[in-house]
Amino acid sequence: MNDPVGQFVAGLASLAAVPDRRAGYVVYRVEPVDGQYAGDSVETAVEVAELANWPIAPPHWIHLPTGIAFPRTNSQPSPIPSWTRHSRQIAEWGTDPNSAQAWLAHVRGVIGEAQ
Amino acid sequence: MNPLSNSRSAARSGARASAAPARRSVTLRDATDAVLRDHLLRVDRQEDICLATYRPSTGATRVSALLREVALPEHGEREVHGNATITAEYVLRVAAHAADDGDGVVMLHSHPRARGWQSMSRPDRDAESSYANLVRELTGLPLIGMTLAGGDLSWSARHWDYGVGGDIRPSHSENVRVIGEQLRISWNDQLVPPPPPRISHVRTMTCWGPRVHADLTRRSVMVVGLGSVGLDISVRLAAAGVTRLGLMDFDTVKEHNLDRLIGATTTDAALRRSKLDIAYRLATANATAATPLIERFDLSVCELAGLAAALDYDQIISCVDRPWPRAVLNATAYRDLIPVIDGGIAVDVFPDRDAGMRNATWRSHVLRPGRPCMACNHQLDLGAVAADMSGALDDPAYIAGDTAAQNTDSANVALLSLNAAASLLAQYVSLNVAPGGLGEPGPLQYILSTHTLEHLPAASRPACPVEALTGLGDSGMRMTGVHPAAEQERRNHNPPNLPRRRRIVRRLDDLIGWTEHRLSRFTRQSL
């Protein structure tokens, strides 16, 4: 409970999401099941600052390479060069006993909407 | 000197280093209380003894021991012979288990026929002091001693945290709180004496009698959020005679608040008064306790100092609407075993604002172990907390791209916010006074359009990450952080930051307020 970032990284690692903690970010990989990137291993990231309350409160922004575009999105430039961060609020957080799994399902679903 | 201050008030803002907490308390859940009663109150009316574990919960001025697990003696670990004694093996077994879990140890015994707060007999003192050093060495936490008076089920408690070796001594708790559908509190009258009866309380005391009134008014209450609902609640608590009232808000009165902040004036908005100043002014003017302690905190509960202040109170009333402070208070109710009475009002409007009003609902609930948390009863979206923490909900660029954020413009009217305040205060009375022996009723919702009051069938989710914090105290996640919006608002209403003309007028207004305050005090005391 005292190392939320460590818990997040360990959770993703247990699900083979290959988390890599870099300066200010945790970069990891997901494989969407729908959409243009279905079956691809897509690199994505969250800000470490947004993990301060993990697993009670999940991150808000999903960072993706700018080439991954959405028909509708509320986005801002990501501090990661050539990346964009997208505002995506996860609903009903706290229902799944495996928080890392719930988070990956959320991100997978978001990337599934990319065009 | 702030003219609004008096000797029994305190105003705090920003992060502030504080001395070690001087006050002590103990908290336990009603389920734990039942297990302990079952063991300690014997059919043969002899004394009995057992051990339990605890975690500390540290506020700015108070440390509370939160009881976690009762460790009943196994065969041969205690003897009952009128009095009761335990073996060193029992203490070592429980202390080792506690140390592994990061807990401390509590030693509990009974006085079967006694009533009220118990002082220690020599055997009690010898028993506790003989293990106090050992337990502290093994667990790193002071031994807590507790006594259950069988005559009226009162608890008393002390923390063996003063001195070392043969000179170890206890710091006595000011109260012991049992959290359930009712909040039951045993008082150490020497540290927190019952307030003297006053003529101004006669009508209130008629409702529940002088004993309940003396108990109720000793219970400290922190009101977090001093908008339309919180302001009204603060004034009513002060008027009811509550002796220790905390007020917390960092916001500034603005003109668009004036249709709901009853008691705030156009002058307050023009002079950039803080909402805290308004609440303090009105609560002080309406207070009926002989020496009310009204503490002011120009803070957010999301800031470390704000949360530490809130942990000093026996109960918290939550009148905030943002996800982050709601998440902090939600976690506090479970982690620190401080009941949080929460609620608010939501007004539904038609998309075409000229089409009139669709509906309004006001809800109220007590957050505590045994009741669903705010997220479980759908009054807090944990997914929105990170956005609030990051400042996105105040960022025009973010709001411009987010339809949901644009729609959260807090429609609210004074004609209805009073109902939310009333609903919260009804929960407060049920929790503290238990009319008819019934405690707080669970989540309630009133629907204005049909005028229907509903008991909501909310339930805790098995995987709830908030309720998993129950009883962890200082070792549980706090969810606090730097709060730029609070810092900005404090700068906004801080007098040195006002333009010169406003600063001069504010000084004049301060002087008028100070004169009124002194006159009121003189009148109360002398005429």
Image (cartoon, coloured by chain):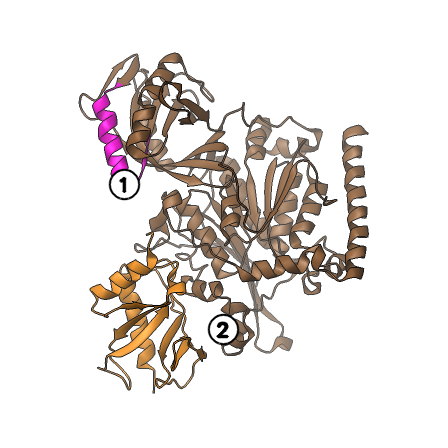
Chain colours: A orange, B brown
Q: Mark 1 points at which residue?
A: B101
Where is B415 relative to B526, above or below? below
Q: In which quarter of the image is the N terminus of chain B?
A: top right
Q: Position of residue B130 (x, y in %)?
A: 32, 19
Which of disc 1 and disc 2 is earlier in sequence?
1
Read off the residue under disc 2. B404
Residue B67 visible somewhere in the drawing:
yes
Instruction: Tell me which amino acid carries mark 1.
Output: Asp
Amino acid type, callout 2: Ala
Q: Which residue is drawn at 41% across and 24% down?
A: B163
Q: Residues within 10 Å of mark 2 (few under 14, many from 20)?
A: few
Q: Which residue of the protein is positioned furthest toward the front in this rendering?
A: A23
For the residue pair A60 and B282, the one nearer the viewer reads as: A60
Mark 1 is surrounded, within 10 Å at the Cα level, by few (under 14), some (14 to 19) or many (20 or more) other residues, namely: few
Tag 2, which secondary structure?
Answer: helix
Q: Is residue A74 left or right of residue B241?
A: left
In this orientation, which residue lies closer to the viewer: B431 or B186?
B186
